[in-house]
Amino acid sequence: MASVRLENITKKYSKDITALKNINLNIDDGEFVVLVGPSGCGKSTALRIIAGLEDITEGNLFIGGQSAGNIRPKDRNIAMVFQNYALYPHLTVFDNMSFGLKMRRVSKSEINEKIMSAAKMLHIEELLKRKPGELSGGQKQRVALGRAIVREPRVFLLDEPLSNLDAELRAKMRIEIIKLHKKLGTTFVYVTHDQTEAMTMADRVVVIKDGIIQQTDTPKGIYENPANIFTAGFIGSPRMNFIENIVDDRGENILIKARNFNKKIPEKYAGKKLIAGIRPEDIRYDTGKDGDGIDAVHEITEVLGYEAHVHFDCFGEKITARSALKEKLTEGQKVKLYFDLAKIHLFDAESKRNIMLL
């Protein structure tokens, strides 16, 4: 096991293309950290730098407290699991799993012991004589994990390992990887664009956009206290609702589209344009005409079986509420919306930062 530290890491592919911009990240020994962000944000580049598959333009990399920038990939004792599994099609599962060990001249008895132990852990004992072409996607992923396990690496790197699987199998493999991490106690660095994977698997989540770390926190911390508008909108499904706000000169009131909400804010933001954010589960609606809620018009309801995502038009703003299945609303029906004021986030319209965290 080993800690990983990225210190002021910048990666440039050319004068005009910068994949990572001054990345600083400490990953503790045995921690499960997930790098999440949209395609092209730099998360896979960061993983490849840790593996030694990409050169560092600026900055330093430390693995187990030692500088690793000049250590060859094969000497870092790191195992990487790829999106496409990277299995040799002409070799059996046993031979795929043992290939790296044979290259390191490990004895046959030790190879057999390691492979049988990993196969039992991953429930693939009956697959050892098969070739990759005879395996399902989930089985191939288990084999790829097994090949990594037998090496007994200090760090596991997983690059979008579940993206080629269907939804049901992804859910099963998420649980298996979580269990595997707990059994091994090894440092896991996992890359995904899927927020569900990030939120359910990680000890800490690292949100990346345009090569810059936007926020690092526990899944709960990221969800409840997003540092900026990007994180707030990227994490959560349905995404957070954003509503433009105007703050009066005294810094006392926030006006949300034709209705007044009172919320105390820092004086330095008096008179500045803010954006309010509120998650769908923090909004309720009522079909009654009385009450001091915000007037809105129902547009459409998405029924998911266990809950509904209800979409409204509110003075030109599109608002989504997450709700238990209630009475059916008709298109164009008028309702009152009620926001949980304690759950409203306020973002500076210029910097996009959450001013309630400053």
Image (cartoon, helix red, strand yellow):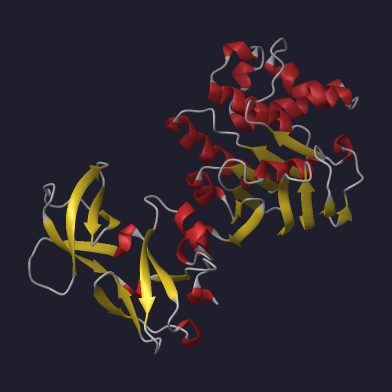
Left/right of residue 322 with respect to residue 193 in the rendered view = left
Estimate the x, y position of residue 55 in percent, counting from the top left.
84, 42
Estimate the x, y position of residue 13 in percent, counting from the top left.
77, 41
Estimate the x, y position of residue 82 in percent, counting from the top left.
67, 31
Q: Is residue 63 above or below residue 141?
A: below
Estimate the x, y position of residue 309 in percent, counting from the top left.
27, 49
Quadrant of the rendering where the C terminus is positioned: bottom right
Left/right of residue 215 with respect to residue 150 in the rendered view = left
- Dividing the picture into quadrants, the one containing residue 122 is top right
Can residue 161 be seen at all in this image of the molecule?
yes
- Dividing the picture into quadrants, the one containing residue 177 is top right
What is the residue that sits farthest to the left in this orientation?
A: 289
Q: Is residue 253 above or below residue 90?
A: below
Q: Nearer the viewer, residue 222 or 176?
A: 222
- Dividing the picture into quadrants, the one containing residue 78 is top right
> Residue at coordinates 64% horizontally, 52% vertically from top-left?
33
Q: Is residue 262 above or below residue 153?
A: below
Left/right of residue 256 with respect to residue 44 in the rendered view = left
Q: Nearer the viewer, residue 55 or 183?
A: 55
> Residue at coordinates 78% horizontally, 46% vertically from top-left?
15
Can residue 63 be seen at all in this image of the molecule?
no
Q: Nearer the viewer, residue 88 or 179?
A: 88
Count of picture labels: 0
